[in-house]
Image: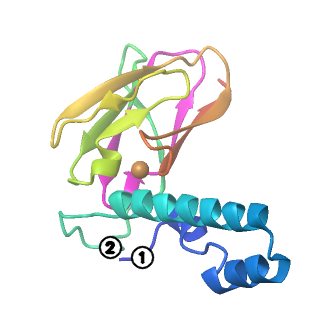
Amino acid sequence: MMPTQHHLGIESPLPPRALRGFVAATGAALPRALGIASFVLVAAAAMIAAACDRPSDGAAAGTGSPTTALATADSSGQQRVAIKVTSKGYEPAEVHFVAGKPAVLEFTRVTESECLNAVKMPWMKEAVPLPLNETVKIPVDTKEAGAFAYSCWMSMIYGRVVIDPAK
Ligand SMILES: [Cu+2]
């Protein structure tokens, strides 16, 4: 499986050897404590990354699914777009609505990844649980054109919503 983009930053921490070199060079207690703290942070980040990267559905990578999708609208103007939550993240990763008409995101999680079992919109305090293989609808305010990112509950895997100006 290809590593997802958000993991790349996590998996390239300061090499431990460089940390040791830094601590040894200064020989001071404070830098040593900082070095240990950095190590703990890196370890914690690595653990979170591991939790995020636990695809157990064996989804085939590179199925060629589009990364961007336009919402479809029914005769009443209701816009909807389906987002599949897979071991690769949100598919499609970017969706477009048109401003001024009601819109809803329809999430269906098909991966058992703990990382992706809840999704958080930027206006939410709490993430919305995404039960496996169930579709969860989340309305989006399209009064104004713009864009926002949403993420898994850990804020590690992101999707994007674009609200295009009405023509
Ligand atoms: Cu995550």
- Circle 1 sits in a helix, a strand or a loop, which is it? loop
Q: Are marks 2 and 1 in contact (CB under 8 Å)?
A: yes
Amino acid on which disc 1 is placed:
Met
Mark 1 CB in 8 Å range of ligand 1?
no
In this rendering, position of residue 155 left or right of residue 147: left
31 lies above or below 92: below
Question: What's the residue at 69%, 77% (across, down)?
Answer: 19
Q: In which quarter of the image is residue 80?
A: top left
Of the image marks 2 and 1, the number of the one nearer the N terminus:
1
Q: Which scheme is used to colour this image of the protein?
A: rainbow
Q: Which of the two discs, 2 and 1, sits closer to the camera?
A: 1
Residue 138: image location, x then y, percent: 37, 24
Residue 128: image location, x then y, percent: 34, 27
Q: Most prominent secondary structure in the magenta stretch?
A: strand
Residue 11: image location, x then y, percent: 54, 72
User: Split into 4 quadrants, where in the image is the N terminus?
Assistant: bottom left
In this rendering, position of residue 154 left or right of residue 60: right
Question: What's the residue at 40%, 61% (across, down)?
Answer: 47
- Circle 2 sits in a helix, a strand or a loop, which is it? loop
Residue under numbered circle 1: 2
Query: Mark 2 to mark 1: distance in Å?
Result: 8 Å
State the residue in front, 24 or 99: 24
Tell whether position 97 is magenta. yes
Residue under numbered circle 2: 61
Give, as a single range, the part of the protein colored magenta: 81-104
